[in-house]
Image: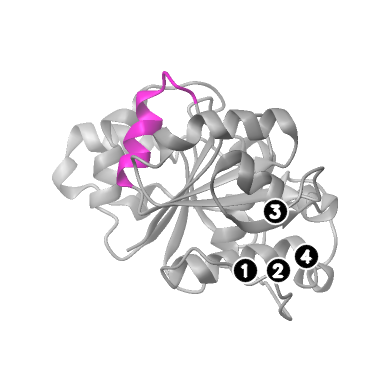
Amino acid sequence: MTIVAVVSCCGAPGVTTLSCLLGATWPSEPVAVIEGDPSGGVLAARFHLSIRTGWASATAAARRDPDRWCLDDHLQELPGGLPVLLAPPGPTSEQGSVVDLVCSASVGTDLIIDLGRLSATDDVARQWLSCAEVIVVLSDGEGAALLALKAWWPRLTSWAPLLLAVRGPGLHGDREIEETIGARVAAWIPSDPGVAAVLTGGSGPGQRKLAKSALVAAAARLSAELTAGTTSVDRDQPSLSVVEDVA
């Protein structure tokens, strides 16, 4: 089982989009995306799904009988088939009581934890980070985001190995970013409004265009590297003929 946390330190560079794309292109199964953002989830509203099955049912079941608790009972599928543990659309403290249970009871299922933007005062996010084997830190490539990332970086290294992904194109290149942060840029995540539209519940490009999207290709490369247990990303653009699970 692999547990990957996806976070940002400033702004909203697309953590949920990247988390879903990593799940959709994950080379092995089973895999599930966990909405762990302390500010609340967005996928239920985007895809018109009920929040009764998700964190609400998971925490209730854990209180009733933690020994028989099963993650699969509380997952819903996005339209493309990606299993997700949905969070309610607002701050909640319920996650904290079952974070360890989710991680320990999910043997055999790889987990991608969407933590959104980190907060220095959030204990639940720290619980998730302590369970993660790798933390993917997603940042915009502009000044304010990089300065926030520089301040967070030493703290993040205390939890798990880090992989720096930068949403681009940005104002700064690899060398400038690496000199600012003190860490190598492992992946560039291109912007793609069409794919983003699909992942916000709206209309978007067809399946063939999704398969050729640079954003989907970048996510596929990154998920392959994560499952291979490395943090180096090949910048060469591979051919990606079909991504059937992108929702």
Residue 64 visible to an observer of this rendering: yes
**Spatial distance from mark 4 to mark 3, Cα to Cα?**
19 Å
The furthest residue to the top: 121
How many residues crowd around disc 1 within 10 Å: few (fewer than 14), some, or many (20 or more)?
many
Estimate the x, y position of residue 206 in percent, counting from the top left.
Answer: 83, 66
Q: Earlier in the sequence, mark 1 or mark 3?
A: 3
What is the quadrant of residue 94 in the picture? Answer: top left
Write the residue at 69% across / 52% down.
Answer: 175
**Tag 2 residue:** 217
Q: Are marks 2 and 4 in contact (CB under 8 Å)?
A: yes
Give the residue type that dot 4 points to: Ala
**Tag 4 residue:** 214
Estimate the x, y position of residue 121 in percent, counting from the top left.
Answer: 41, 18
Secondary structure at numbered mark 4? helix
> Relative to residue 123, is residue 146 depicted above or below?
below
**Tag 3 residue:** 174
Q: Which residue range is magenta in the image? A: 119-131
Give the residue type that dot 3 points to: Asp
**Spatial distance from mark 1 to mark 3, Cα to Cα?**
21 Å
Secondary structure at numbered mark 1? helix
Main secondary structure of the magenta stretch: helix
> Per the image, is 80 magenta?
no
Secondary structure at numbered mark 3? helix
